[in-house]
Image (cartoon, grey):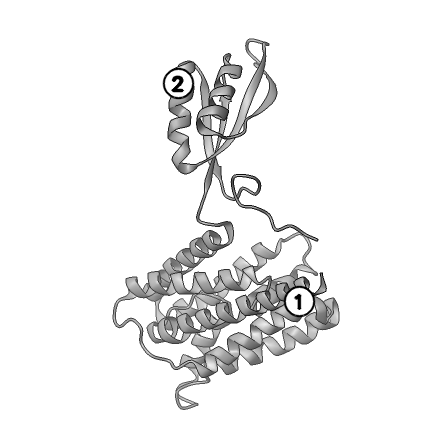
């Protein structure tokens, strides 16, 4: 058991390391050259680098700004929450700063802001997704928001982070212009979608709620033809006051069309509701890891 736990910890740190490398690639080679400020300390670092160019040759490096901004946060965080809770976040912050320092800054995309926003968003989204899969963060506005939320309990961390990141994007618009800020918004949207897709899995399933008087026949046909389990939920029609069985079934995307055709064939008056299931764990879908 100890060995298995150790492997899991190593895997988490590998995910965080790979994720921060991808994040640094997007920041160094796409966001910084194209002046896309997408929030976070990395976005603030791009603003500071540009503003300090007249004073410091080439401006203050991104890695240095990221490290300096995070140091006081972690001292406060460790004092409040303790080092064990922040170990992965500390590793993520240090790892990102190191990657920003050692990865060469070269233009992956030249003079195409749309492609920069899309491609940069994809790389950043995958990177953040890996960091989250490793159960870590990279400090920055995540940490700022968590610390502020301890004083402002009536706001969620997500709300505070949205406000803080919004301020940084506004600073980017002030320094680089509204046009670049709008492209940065595209990058933020793409990043969020890619991160969500990586965390939730790309194999979305479908949920079907079926209300029919022929529930026994429909359930039996689904179990036999599509080979999916069906759950009967007791329901009551509030207009007719009749007791009914509502069928609940989870199927893959490719199985939803045969399921609808099957229901229509048995009962063309059946009422079917279909919605997305972002993650399904269990037999026939994603198997949960067995804990020993």
Up-down relation of residue 282 to residue 152 (above or below): above
Residue 83, above or below 260: below
Report the Cα–Cα distance between label 1 and label 2. 52 Å
Left or right of residue 37: residue 245: right
Q: Is residue 115 left or right of residue 263?
A: left
Q: Residues within 10 Å of mark 1 (few under 14, many from 20)?
A: few
Q: Which picture quadrant has residue 246?
A: top right
Q: Viewer-proximal residue, 45 or 100?
A: 100
Pick the front one: 53 or 98: 98
Residue 151's place in the image compared with 239, above or below, is below
> Regarding mark 2 in the picture, which secondary structure is present there?
helix
Q: Quadrant of the N terminus?
A: bottom right
Tell me which corner region of the image, top left, top right, bottom left or bottom right, holds residue 89: bottom right
Q: Is residue 282 above or below residue 1?
A: above
- Residue at 55% x, 69% y is 14
From the image, tell me which residue sits under label 2: 264
* Residue 19 placement, left or right of 185: right
Q: Which residue is mark 1?
A: 6
Q: Nearer the viewer, mark 1 or mark 2?
A: 1
Residue visible at 37% across and 29% down in the picture = 257
Q: Residue furthest left?
A: 111
Query: Sequence-wise, which precedes: disc 1 or disc 2?
Result: 1
């Amino acid at each position: 058991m100890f060995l298995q736990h150790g492997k899991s910890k190593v895997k988490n740190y590998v995910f965080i390391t790979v994720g921060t490398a991808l994040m640094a690639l997007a920041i160094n080679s796409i966001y910084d050259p194209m002046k896309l400020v997408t929030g976070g300390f990395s976005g603030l670092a791009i603003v500071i680098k540009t503003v300090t160019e007249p004073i410091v040759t080439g401006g203050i490096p991104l890695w240095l700004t990221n490290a300096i901004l995070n140091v006081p946060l972690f001292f406060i965080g460790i004092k409040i929450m303790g080092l064990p809770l922040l170990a992965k976040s500390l590793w993520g912050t240090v790892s990102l700063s190191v990657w920003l320092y050692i990865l060469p800054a070269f233009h992956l995309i030249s003079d195409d802001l749309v492609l920069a926003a899309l491609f940069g968003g994809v790389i950043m989204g995958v990177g953040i997704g890996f960091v989250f899969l490793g159960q870590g963060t990279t400090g920055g506005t995540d940490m700022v928001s968590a610390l502020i939320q301890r004083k402002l309990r009536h706001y969620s961390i997500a709300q505070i982070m949205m406000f803080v990141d919004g301020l940084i994007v506004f600073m980017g618009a002030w320094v680089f212009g509204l046009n670049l800020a709008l492209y940065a918004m595209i990058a933020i949207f793409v990043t969020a979608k890619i991160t969500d897709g990586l965390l939730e899995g790309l194999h979305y399933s479908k949920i079907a709620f079926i209300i029919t008087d022929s529930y026994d026949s429909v359930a039996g046909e689904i179990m036999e033809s599509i080979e999916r389990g069906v759950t009967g939920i007791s329901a009551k029609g509030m207009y007719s006051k009749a007791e009914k069985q509502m069928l609940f079934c989870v199927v893959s995307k490719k199985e939803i069309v045969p399921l609808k055709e099957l229901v229509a064939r048995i009962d063309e008056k059946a009422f079917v509701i279909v919605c997305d299931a972002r993650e399904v764990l269990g037999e026939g879908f994603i198997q949960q890891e067995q804990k020993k």
